[in-house]
Amino acid sequence: MQSLSTNQILFNASFSKDEFKKTYLAAIEAKFGKKQETIVSYPGGKLKMKKELNEIFTEMTKTNKFNTYIDGFFGMGGSFKALSDALLEHQVKEIIVNDISRCIIIMHKCIRDYADEMIEYYLERIRCDIVMPYQKLFIAAEDLIIVKKKWIAEFESLQKDKKFGIETSTLFIMLCAFNFSGVVQTNKKGDIRFTQKLFCINNIKNFLFNTIGRIRTFNELYNKFDMKFYSSDYFALFQNYQYKTDTLWNIDTVYLKEDYSEYKKADMENIKNSSIVGCTCNYGQNDFDHIGVLETLKNINFIYNNNTHPLVYHYIKKLNLPYKKFIRHEAINDNIKENAKASQNL
Ligand SMILES: C[S@@+](CC[C@H](N)C(=O)[O-])C[C@H]1O[C@@H](n2cnc3c(N)ncnc32)[C@H](O)[C@@H]1O
């Protein structure tokens, strides 16, 4: 008797939701057991600064006992993940996470509370949008583009109506798997936008093999702590939680522009009147108040992160803030950059 291919087995199972789930999980189970380091890997993620973040944390815990950790700009939670073992070890159980993007915050909350439902939703999308119509899992690039467009349209329609929940949270993770280096774009209102283009057909492997692992890994992690989720502007959160000596803040703000030559010429000559403007990626927050954030630091225990910039030094000195210099290890390697250039020029 001829044995069936994985595609045929999955297609046969796809007529029943439960059967498909069982078959799919069994077919690629070995891949799902793997722990994942990130929910979504992207260049702003701070997992790459794990060593440095832990060094600073160790230094600070020599003179402080922290009970609470507040992440004012949570993003994809890379800084928190990098510090999570140390936080557990030091019994810092209360974790307050905040990001101005409601969609992002609801996604983290759903991962903690509704991981099984998110996985069900993900499997349904694979069954209904890929396996049933195409009768296979690894579809061609042109078909994947069509499927991706459909998911983007659904995500954007839910986002427009501010209906953030299990669907937007799962679609967000799914769609990020197809983004170039995970870069999430936001428009001026702070809404998330996904590119229609497919940067690399190999992303489908990441999508098929890692999505469940990502959800499960972070569900497990978040349930180890007492986590509270906020979607506020940093300054509002700061007002409520400043002056708490048992609290450590992680402030991984919007990045300053790395090319500051224009400031050198004009502003550095007249530093008293200069302000820091411009961000490499403003996440939809125009005119981000970098100096305002620096000024909040004197009232809290903090780890603050930003690009080097002469004006930051000026304010660090003026405000008498302690600092350390680190080399940032880039997440994007030259090879991927070349591919990106090539695909952008198409
Ligand atoms: C550099 S990312 C944080 C990366 C994160 N530490 C990680 O490792 O994944 C900056 C985040 O700040 C958020 N953000 C921008 N302006 C904000 C504001 N005014 N208040 C709070 N969050 C803000 C953005 O939505 C973005 O997710």
Image (cartoon, rainbow, N blue to C red):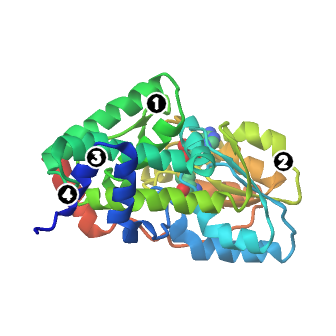
Q: Which class describes the residues within 10 Å of circle 4: few (<14), some (14-19), or many (20+)? A: some
Instruction: Please state if 256 lies on the left or on the right of 8 as rendered.
Output: right
Give how far apart the Cα atoms at labels 3 and 2 are.
53 Å
Q: Which class describes the residues within 10 Å of circle 3: few (<14), some (14-19), or many (20+)? A: many
Give how far apart the Cα atoms at labels 4 and 1 are.
43 Å
Q: Amino acid at mark 1?
A: Lys
Residue receiving disc 2: 242
* Comes first in the chain, label 3 or label 2: 3
Q: Nearer the viewer, residue 245 or 204?
A: 204
Cβ at disc 3 under 8 Å from ligand 1 = no
Task: Say the numbered circle drawn on residue 14.
Answer: 3
Q: Nearer the viewer, residue 338 or 30?
A: 30
Q: Could you tell me which residue is drawn at 50 percent across and 67 percent down?
A: 37
Give how far apart the Cα atoms at labels 1 and 2 are.
29 Å
* Circles 3 and 2: CB atoms closer than 8 Å: no
* Circles 4 and 1: CB atoms closer than 8 Å: no
Q: Is residue 71 visible?
A: yes
Q: Could you tell me which residue is drawn at 70 percent across and 59 percent down?
A: 316
Task: List the single residue furthest toward the front.
Answer: 1
Instruction: Please state if 258 lies on the left or on the right of 234 as rendered.
Output: left
Residue receiving disc 4: 7
Q: Nearer the viewer, mark 4 or mark 1?
A: 4
Q: Amino acid at mark 4?
A: Asn
Q: Secondary structure at mark 1?
A: loop
Q: Secondary structure at mark 2?
A: loop
Residue receiving disc 1: 188
Q: Secondary structure at mark 4?
A: helix
Q: Amino acid at mark 3?
A: Ser
* Comes first in the chain, label 2 or label 4: 4
Task: List the single residue furthest toward the top.
Answer: 161
Give how far apart the Cα atoms at labels 2 and 4 are.
56 Å
